[in-house]
Amino acid sequence: MAESDTATSQTIEINEVMKRIPHRYPFLMVDRVVNFVPYEGAIGIKNVSINEPHFQGHFPERPIMPGVLIVESMAQTAGVVVVSSLGTDAEGKLVYFMSVEEAKFRRPVEPGDQLQIHVTRKQNRGPVWKFEGRATVDGTLVAEAVFTAMIKDAE
């Protein structure tokens, strides 16, 4: 997102995030969303804590956040973008992950890191939305992916 977008961007705090997506502990991978610009993108914030259950087994001697959970944090941030952009049109609907492409992991994410999950809408046609995601820690790229999701009625 361009810097000029920050003047019109919004912050979505955790209670509002939980109203927009159904995920809960231990699978909620977004603590806050900042720089939200409807139909464009946002930055999700994930504070990585040693208290998260996946660190018990991944890996006990050197705990690192699983790459699939980093991609999941991208998808959850994108879900907040979709639902927040659509407003009342998204009531009673869920955002379903459809595909992941071009996923690359650049460096491990460890307890104490703060993930900044940059998601940008590449396109959307009807209920299908395609995003580009980039996760950074202290400004360093740690992971990236292109992914697609669909918004559907909750079943």
Image: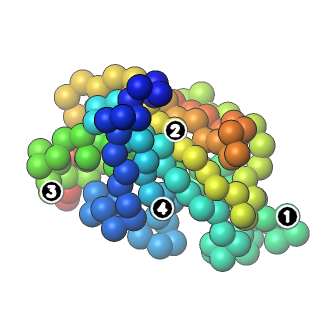
Q: Secondary structure beneath disc 1? A: loop
Q: Secondary structure beneath disc 4? A: loop
73 w.r.t. 86: above or below = below
User: Residue 17 placed where, x, y %?
Assistant: 35, 59
User: Residue 127 placed where, x, y %?
Assistant: 22, 34
Q: Earlier in the sequence, mark 4 or mark 3?
A: 4
- What residue sits right under mark 1 in the picture? 62
From the image, state whether disc 1 or disc 2 is nearer to you: 2
Direction left: furthest residue: 88
Q: What is the distance, in whole Å, between disc 3 and disc 1 at their CAs?
A: 41 Å
Q: Secondary structure beneath disc 2? A: strand
Q: Amino acid at mark 3?
A: Gly
Q: What is the distance, in whole Å, between disc 2 and disc 3 at their CAs?
A: 26 Å
Q: Earlier in the sequence, mark 4 or mark 2?
A: 4
Q: Earlier in the sequence, mark 1 or mark 2?
A: 1
Left or right: residue 90 compared with residue 15: left
**Mark 4 packing: few (<14 Cα in 10 Å), some, or many (20+)?**
some
Q: Amino acid at mark 1?
A: Arg
Labelled disc at residue 92: 3
- What residue sits right under mark 4 in the picture? 31
Q: Earlier in the sequence, mark 2 or mark 3?
A: 3
Q: Amino acid at mark 2?
A: His
Q: Are marks 1 and 2 in contact (CB under 8 Å)?
A: no
Direction right: furthest residue: 61
Q: Amino acid at mark 4?
A: Asp
One can see residue 33 in this view = yes
Q: What is the distance, in whole Å, between disc 1 and disc 2 at their CAs?
A: 26 Å
Residue at (70, 45) in percent of width and height: 138
Q: Are marks 2 and 3 in contact (CB under 8 Å)?
A: no
Quarter-wise, where is residue 131 in the image? top left
- What residue sits right under mark 2 in the picture? 118
